[in-house]
Image (spheres, rainbow, N blue to C red):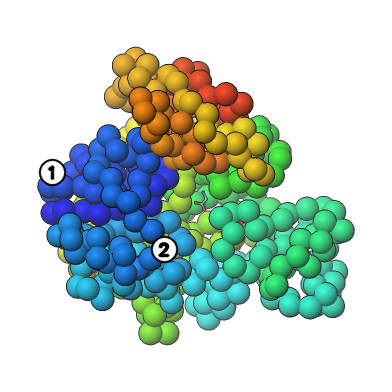
Amino acid sequence: MKVLVIGGGAREHALCRSLSLDPDVSALYCAPGNAGIAEVAELRPVDALDGAAVAALATELGAGLVVVGPEAPLVAGVADAVRAVGIPVFGPSAEAAQLEGSKAFAKDVMAAAGVPTARSYVCTTPEEVDEALDAFGAPYVVKDDGLAAGKGVVVTEDLAAARAHALACDRVVIEEYLDGPEVSLFAITDGVTVLPLQPAQDFKRALDGDEGPNTGGMGAYSPLPWADPKLVDEVMELVLQPTVDELRRRGTPFSGLLYAGLAITGRGTRVIEFNARFGDPETQVVLARLQTPLASVLLNAARGTLDAEPPLRWRDDAAVTVVIASHNYPETPRTGDPIEGLAEVAAEDGPDAYVLHAGTRREGDAVVSAGGRVLSVTATGSDLAEARDKAYKAVARIRLDGSQHRTDIAAKAAERP
Ligand code: AMP
Ligand code: GLY
């Protein structure tokens, strides 16, 4: 099977890496890709937001499966355009992707499906904003209703800051603060059958100790030794299956990757957000542990035959990924800096540690930074402590002027017996 992956971040590099190792995949293409993906897939230029262009490229390549990585093309209807030319596509329709594209829509679906989440108000006027902030009190949680790459959410004790963020958005969701550790749980679905993956934890804040601004994600690990072993079953029953059933009932079935961002609170598990695609950087650690070849699972989801898929198989290994970000990420990341040390990691640390590229591009013989999150250094080990050691050893070999990374990814989880 020929597979075309749309996107160009470390998530797409992880997807391409897994697909390139799958004997069912005869040719692998990625559009637009990045410098690292070019080592496992043939790159094609495309405007990822242009459905007609993506469909034409998939047709030209004779693709038997298109996998759409990021949310923006999904919300723009790229999966619909590919489906319309008769090519199976892994990724939801624009309508179903509203689960991520609009926080208000997601809240409405959750209410109808009885899915536990934070109580919330949708506000469009300053009066509504003040009422909602007053009703919940501090800490305040204020979310831009639209897509914001994980950066439209402000969680703060400061009423003035909460109010200022709310007033800067056209439409905001203001909600109850959820206290407790966060878990990302992904499920592959064809709109009927739901196949959960293994849970992971993401580190959203820029700085060690969960300080600093929210980012797209600075690192991740899996499995979660501290989590209740029944967590996946519980979330399947309370969250994933009811959500998939509700979207089908509405006539907008969700097929693709359903990402539940969860808070494990003292009062039970609550949904913080849904995403309509694989998470980044959690995918890097989840796929590092997945033993089942990926292509047939994604194809069965795309075709509506996921019930034919046997249970997924997982390695016992733990996985850790550490994001290396550019100078000034997430505000105004500096790009164009040369990246050194990639060959050393490949020579000295492989195959258990490897570098997945996010914002990179090739300039002659050099690889240079081309985005906020630049690399996602990933490693597996017999436990989290070993995976973490290997990941940080590889991180230490990378040289990128002004770059930043967190030093505490998976640190607490690795301490537990
Ligand atoms: P979101 O874009 O909805 O995932 O929000 C980004 C981050 O903000 C989440 O990963 C949480 O760390 C935090 N957050 C969002 N909603 C809440 C909430 N209701 N209570 C506490 N923290 C939240
Ligand atoms: N890691 C968070 C996200 O992918 O939205």
Which residue appears at 20% of the width and 68% of the height?
A: 87
Query: Quick one: label 1 or label 2, which is nearer the N terminus?
Result: 1
Whether residue 352 appears in this view of the structure is yes
Quadrant in the rendering for residue 303: bottom left
Which residue appears at 39% of the width and 71% of the height?
A: 77
Q: Label 1 belongs to which residue?
A: 23
Whether residue 286 appears in this view of the structure is no
Residue 55 drawn at (x, y percent): 27, 66
Which is nearer the eye, 219 or 342? 342
Q: Label 2 belongs to which residue?
A: 49
Which is nearer the eye, 378 or 385? 378
Residue 174 drawn at (x, y percent): 72, 68
Quarter of the picture containing the N terminus is: bottom left
Instruction: Name the disc covering residue 130, or none.
Output: none
Residue 200 drawn at (x, y percent): 46, 45
Quadrant in the rendering for residue 39: top left
Whether label 1 touches label 2, CB < 8 Å: no
Disc 2 secondary structure class: loop
Disc 1 residue: CB within 8 Å of ligand 2: no
Number of disc labels: 2
Seen in the image, is 305 located left or right of residue 324? left
Which residue appears at 57% of the width and 24% of the height?
A: 401
Residue 42 drawn at (x, y percent): 24, 43
Q: Separation of disc 1 and disc 2 at Cα?
A: 30 Å
